[in-house]
Amino acid sequence: MSGLGGLNKSPNGLVLGMVQLQLPVVKTAADLAAQTERICTMVAKARRNLPTMDMVVFPEYALHGLSMDTNPEIMCRMDGPEVAAFRQACIDNRIWGCFSIMEFNPEGYPYNVGFILDDKGELQLYYRKLHPWVPVEPWEPGNLGIPVCTGPNGAKIALIICHDGMFPEMARESAYKGAEIMIRTAGYTAPIRHTWKITNQANAFCNLMVTASVCMCGSDGSFDSMGEGMFVNFDGTVMVQGSHRPDEIITCEVRPDLVREARAHWGVENNIYQFGHRAYVAVKGGAQDCPYTFMQDMVAGRYRLPWEDTVKVTDGSSCGFPKPERIYQNPTTSPVKKHA
């Protein structure tokens, strides 16, 4: 149930608007400024579109397009003019907003960043993409984990970006940290259509969590993004699904209170609880060990596939990026004082 896309908002509901933004071409600082203004205009459109809307969500690459250009002149900073404009748009329109930037990183490649501002323009969530879409994307690996914030009407919200959603561990971590709604923003193109749908549904059902996902839309003359925003309820049912129409804003009322109810009362298929309490019918509290070799090996720094030596694509050279020489270190520096 979507409350007719949020037209009939319930006391416990949260109305989200997912913007299937037209894919832009951004090459210069002037292009960046123009696209910033366009996004702010769409914030105002979202507010006019539906007075009950609590949060408007823009897809990954909404500001920069799909060029993968790392030119420092068009990279952003959290204290820069683009984010300042987004803050003001949220204030002016009395609405929460979720935005995407490619953020300058003085120590390497830029970070692919998503963040949430409240209706006073204050930062409530800041996230660096953990899993760039290799070998296509050059972004620095995220190093701040998956944050969860308290959103409108007390809803617990996580944000992941695009390829992140292909790893079930990302959704599980979001739910484990309390998320009732997981937003997934993307720039995906049409070949990913099927896997986009099934992972959004699986991520919801396997964690008793609402997923709200949106892609860029339309063509930039080289790439064709698919749009197809979608809302999936915690039982895996698709509540609302967008088309391929650029700039369409799809809306839905989601019910975090029903997520909480299911997590508390479901017996059969309460997967997020049962994962850590195996066979609680047989043994008190269930087994709470870690029987998964890949988890143990990853923690120990020895993750290795049985077929590791046969993998052919292990860097970005096939997409025009030089083979990296730098070994990953895990800095924890953040350009913002607040991140959940």
Image (tube, rainbow, N blue to C red):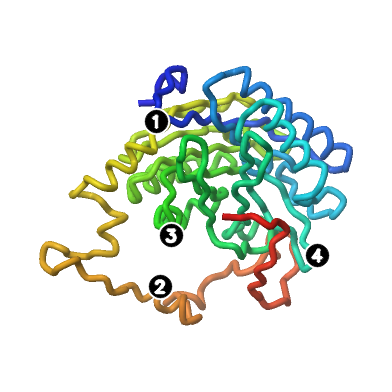
Q: Amino acid at mark 4?
A: Pro
Name which of mark 1 and mark 3 comes first in the sequence: 1
Q: Which mark is residue 106?
A: 4
Depth check, mark 1 against mark 4: the one in front is 1
How far apart in space, not on screen, are marks 1 and 3 (Cα)?
Answer: 28 Å
Give the structural element (helix, strand or loop) at label 3: helix
- Mark sitting on residue 169: 3
Where disc 4 sits, the SS reads loop
Give the mark, 1 or 4, whose residue is nearer the N terminus. 1
Question: Camera-side residue: 29 or 76?
Answer: 76
- Any mark on residue 12, and which? 1
Q: Earlier in the sequence, mark 4 or mark 3?
A: 4
Which numbered mark, 1 or 2, is in the foreground of this view? 1
Residue carrying label 2: 295
Which of the marked residues, 2 or 3, is nearer the chain's N terminus?
Answer: 3
Percent x, y for residue 25? 78, 37
Does residue 30 appear anywhere in the picture? yes
**Where 133 falls versus 189 (above or below)?**
below
